[in-house]
Image (cartoon, rainbow, N blue to C red):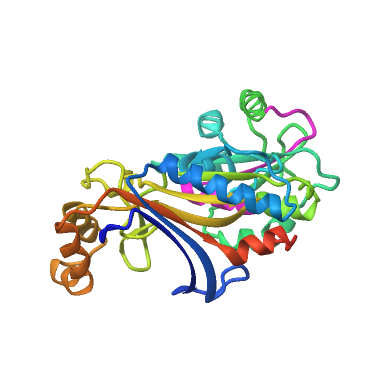
Amino acid sequence: MMAGYERYYQIARCFRDEDTRADRQPEFTQLDLEMAFVTEEEVLETTEAVMSAVFAAAGFPVADPPWPQLRFAEAMARYGSDRPDTRFGLEIHDVSDVVRGSEFKVFESVLAAGGSCARSTRARAISRAPSRTDCRRCPALRRESRCTDLRRFRRGLQRESGEVLLAGAVEAVLRELSGSAGDLLLFVADQEHVAARALGALRLELAERFGLIDRSRHDVLFVRDFPMFEWSEGEDRWTAMHHPFTAPVGDDFTEPAKLLSRGYDLVCDGVELGGGSIRINTPEVQEQVFKVIGLSEQDARERFGFLLDALCYGAPPHGGIALGIDRIVAICAGARRSAK
């Protein structure tokens, strides 16, 4: 883009500098689209045009564009995932205000620690209610094992141990979750992101185990407005959630936790098929991002001096998206991605 090419595409062989997983191999192929003088909406519209043609050619039934768009915060709040599978219910609800003052010690102790929350999901169409042991054995939930506790309630929200939510809290929870007698309610109380991810993992496990997913249905959507930065406890510093060349929304870097990015992902049936962003096109903003993620001016100059110099000559606003061809082929071929 800086050299004057207004737009291009390429099919690139890539190597991934991160841990290998079942759907994340060290070597993969992507369709890379880059365009100058575009907005997020124009990139997403181009992606819809390309991918709807691909799905049609593969005989993979999806809804016609435009496809739904979810903000990252909404996706995490409702599904506990930034690549949500929306083909079934079990949506997550924040019931902090509902259970506050209920005298239930687990909730009260967590909520008393500022910035915490209680989240719950409701399971109705399940033939056999999973026990607490079942839930604890859930492989996906174990990966999110930082959560303080998982609590199950059924038949009037009374646990086997005899713990009972106050009547007023029972009615309020049922109203919040549109629940009724006999529903299974699963609660996690912890920090917001921990509780959401824990229930998001359990949500997928329950859907797989009890056949709640309609395999003949395929949901495609975009997730956007990701946080610009995320805190890495292992490295004790801020890191870029997408990559450090993603443009931020605004230019106030005083509170990194509140800054959003102009990044977006394409998701199908709970699988991320591609991601991209509008890029940074000024050296001042790029230097600010490097500073937040802990790169000294000297390190930034040694590693990315070529980029900072190029930005000084004037770069157009530009953005794009990279689509994972391997994953697209796999999902069109019917390969299933297990929550485990």
Return the residue nearer the eye: 109 or 225. Answer: 225
Whether residue 138 is visible: no
Residue at 37% x, 46% y: name it.
262
Residue at 70% x, 39% y: name it.
89
Whether residue 250 is visible: yes
Which quadrant does the N terminus fall into?
Answer: bottom left
Residue sitting at the far front: 5
Q: Is residue 255 left or right of residue 278?
A: left
Q: Is residue 310 above or below residue 165?
A: below
- Report x, y in % for residue 72: 47, 44
Return the residue nearer the eye: 221 or 137. Answer: 221
Residue at 56% x, 45% y: name it.
49
Q: Which residues are magenta?
A: 178-201
- Report x, y in % for residue 250: 26, 41
- Report x, y in % for residue 157: 71, 35
Q: How many marks?
A: 0
Return the residue nearer the eye: 323 or 264. Answer: 323
> Residue 198 lies in magenta, yes or no?
yes
